[in-house]
Amino acid sequence: MSVEITSPHFKANAREALADAPLQQALAKVGPGFIGKRAAAAGKLPEFEALRDSARDIKDHTLAHLDLYLERYEAKVKEAGGHVHFAVDAAEARDIITRICRSLDAKTVTKGKSMISEEIGLNDHLEAAGIEPVETDLGEYLIQIRGEAPSHIIAPAIHLNKEQVEADFRRVHTHLSPGRNLSEPTALLAEARGELRQRFLAADVGITGANFLVAETGTSIIVTNEGNGDLTQTLPKAHIVLASLEKLVPTLEDVSQLLRVLARSATGQEMSVYTTFSTGPRRPDDVDGPGEYHVVILDNGRSGMLGGQLREMLRCIRCGACMNHCPVYHAVGGHAYGWVYPGPMGAVLTPSLIGIEKAANLPNASTFCGRCEEVCPVRIPLPKLMRHWREKEFERHLTPAPQRFGLAVWGFFARRGWLYRPATRLAMGMLALAGRRKGRFASLPLAGGWTRHRDFPAPEGGTFQAQWRARKAAEADARAAKGAAR
Amino acid sequence: MTSSRDTVFASVRRALGVTSREAPRLQEVGDRIAGHPRGLVPARAQVPPAECIALFKEMVLAAAASIDHLPSANQVPAAVAAYLRGRNLPPTILRGADPRLSALPWGQEPNLDVWIGPSDGRQLAGLSHAFAGIAESGTLVMLSGPDNPSTLNLLPDHHLVVVDAADVTADYETVWGRIRARFGAGIMPRTVNWITGPSRSADIEQTLLLGAHGPRSLHVLLVGEPV
Amino acid sequence: MTVPPSLDAALSPPRVGLFCTCLVDTIRPSVGFAAAKLLEEAGCEVEVPLQTCCGQPAFNSGDRATSRALAEQVISAFENFDYVVAPSGSCAGMIKAHYPELFTGEPDWTGRVDRFCAKVFELVSFLVDVRGVTHVDAAYPGTATYHDSCSGLRELGVKGQPRRLLASVDGLALVEMQDADTCCGFGGTFCVKYPDVSNAIVEKKAANIVASGADTLLAGDLGCLMNMAGKLQREGRAVAVRHVAEVLAGMGAEPALGMPATVEARAETARAKR
């Protein structure tokens, strides 16, 4: 999958997504699935809200001391016999990983799910270098064989239905009997398990991401339900961890706090099935495990965020709760966002990584309903950060001209009450008259965006302020008349 | 020539407005790592040993694993044989060289074929001894090493795990303390696996299915009573 | 209306500055009158200072300068009241939750803004939480469902209060729709910036409203109400859409949002305003 960016075409993407019936059917399952489960998990744990505060505080503390925790982490990885490589940008990270694979004469590489690897476009690069990457997370495998990008950060193939998966398996697993029955998800899973099992055992190098990096011990942590990350990191000759630098956490106790909120926020599980703590290569008396352990730490824009108004975004632990609760995501799915990270977290992170010029649609395509912030385990103020991007856009005059003009006109009148009040009286009077018979408009000049899908209610006529003042004046007159009469 | 490492550290320092040599910050970081404060532990995970075992059983079952509570380790071979029979599996088990497993009365199950070593993916059932159990979420803690190769946790279809009731803690934090005691402060083995139930995936139409890549079935053999 | 007597005992009636909101001002003034009536019945003295807009459209579009200028206007016009009440969670939320942000790092303003924001309230939560109102003297025959507008709910905690007061309305049956607290897709300028996405969201909301079986839709924000009414009416649904204040103030016989005024309704309106 390539890192082609289609975020500038969000509106067209969205329209396509809305007309895509199988996608809409799949999306209809997202809310009911994830929302209820998270609420149930949070409800069962009385300390859940306090744990969110604790998680946020740990992240904030770490970010404020990131230089020191990175130093510690690096030292501990080396002490355990591992290697640490720093990559300033995506290109460098790709090169480092390719170099390591080449040094081991790697033909096949298994991959645990890694959003960073999507961000840097690793798979295409490896293929061009003659190395075959095999995605082992089932969702990632499904989209890999379709040549698609993930549409969700923890459930990458959430947009697919089982008929599509069956069609893809038949197309790709040509060595298997055409007459086999693949109508049930259990059969599909069994087939994937069989196919990937061979790849796991044959792989030369295993590449995983990391949910967390622990400074105290030089440990990388992956969290899966499938066990694919474990097979990826245990069986091959080398284990490469690819992680961005904000994944640092100080201690094992600190990471336990974060783990208490991660699975609950993501899928409503108390704990994911496999939480694996990896430190260095195999030890001299181990009977299995990789001979080499490499950690590639990627910056690619994070240090820039650290010093500014987007620091809070670096708390993100990639649980996906925000997009699971987002009405916009429910409507259009992840691909519409046009790059690697969808939903509210994608709306905030993407402009930092690819620039606000390309990503402008993302922080704008939000109603600011606030549900994302309500469920974020580390309390990232996502709407506030999206608004920050809108301010940056406005400052740089990137806001579309008609919108900017409309708001300027509104602002002009709103700041001049003496103009605003008569102007609105006049306008509303006219509209009220025009809309008197039906009570609403099916179409209205300059309001095409609204009336395309909705009627526009006719104003009652006369503004509240004008009517109120008239009423008060009448009351004053009545009192004066009464007073005079006495 | 500035290395990438230098560039990244310079960027981070610039963003934070620090030199990395400021004494108060170094102190704070040093203290946190040395002191590793526990943080907030849920009340559920602060129960006495008897309740802890009950909670562990409840959570193991909730994670779709199965559990047998055996009065002593001597019953383990019989329990393993019974499990294999019950699932219609051949009477073969692969285990690690863990001395606690080696000390078991395997002779009592003469029909049981016991192999020792890491898994290469061809075995149907594996047996490990857990380092600990965590009642808070019904989690097993497995350490890599010759005693219990990590491949046993992942490759066989059926994973059986012996855990001593005395090694079941209520919370995660206690286990970290025990790992520090065993390996030294700041030191970890190659892999620590927290395992909570059998492998699963919901990637196909949000349908939850067991046995994605790891074991389809996880069976816990809880031995003895808490100290 | 029941107000605990102790509140009114020794104090002179609190002076409330009614922030009518630009949508109420321009589209549906009767909501402003309903709000004033409810506040007066709760023992408050209501005034309506000259006002325009809270600045939210500018704020959410990234135009801090305009939002700041409008915030100063609002604060100057309203700060000498005991309370500032708006029949809108969105506008009250803008003022209460976001005005402080517009003045960060300005010691001259900070205290003044904080003191001001402390007395700003959404209408129904003001009646229930501050004035202690537990019951209204109103009648409304029908089945209503209540939509929780996002800002009111998540910025100001407005959820139980409208339901509590609606429960006291004679003849009114309240039914909950599915996903009552899910966004309706209005989002201010969002609905015209991304009309197709907004439409998809409001379609779901309309389906939930219809499925609830209610003949009336109520909410505390006119923007949301206009959005939902517009969709229901485009779909030809016979659900009357009103602001919750109208029903609580006994003004539920006025023409519903987007409905033409009938002769009877016009007479009723004139009576209610006297």
Image (cartoon, coloured by chain):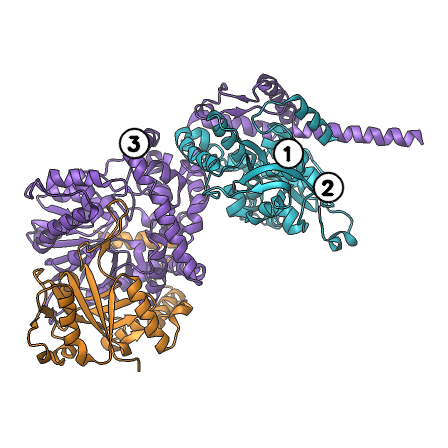
Chain colours: A purple, B orange, C cyan
Of circles 1 and 3, the one toward us is: 1
- Tell me how many marks there are: 3
Q: Position of residue A42 (x, y in %)?
A: 41, 57
Q: Are marks 1 and 2 on the same chain?
A: yes
Circle 2: element type: helix
Is A83 rendered above or below residue C173? below
Question: Which residue is label 2 attached to?
Answer: C40
Disc 2 residue type (three-letter): Glu
Which residue is at the front of the view, B137 or C170? C170
Is A250 rendered above or below residue B110? above
Chain of the residue on which disc 1 is drawn: C
Task: Give the quadrant of residue A396.
Answer: top left
Q: Residue at x 43, y 48 (%)?
A: A373
Chain of the residue on which disc 2 is drawn: C
Q: Is residue A157 left or right of residue A109?
A: right
Residue farthest toward the right in the current orientation of the protein: A486
Which residue is at the front of the view, A111 or B135? B135
Is C169 rendered above or below residue A217? above
Which residue is at the front of the view, A405 or A228? A228
Q: Position of residue B24 (x, y in %)?
A: 40, 66
Circle 3: element type: loop
| Mark identifier at residue A20 | 3
Question: Which residue is label 1 attached to?
Answer: C252
| Mark identifier at residue B157 | none
Indicate which disc, 1 or 2, sits on the residue closer to the N terminus.
2
Disc 1 residue type (three-letter): Gly
Disc 3 residue type (three-letter): Asp
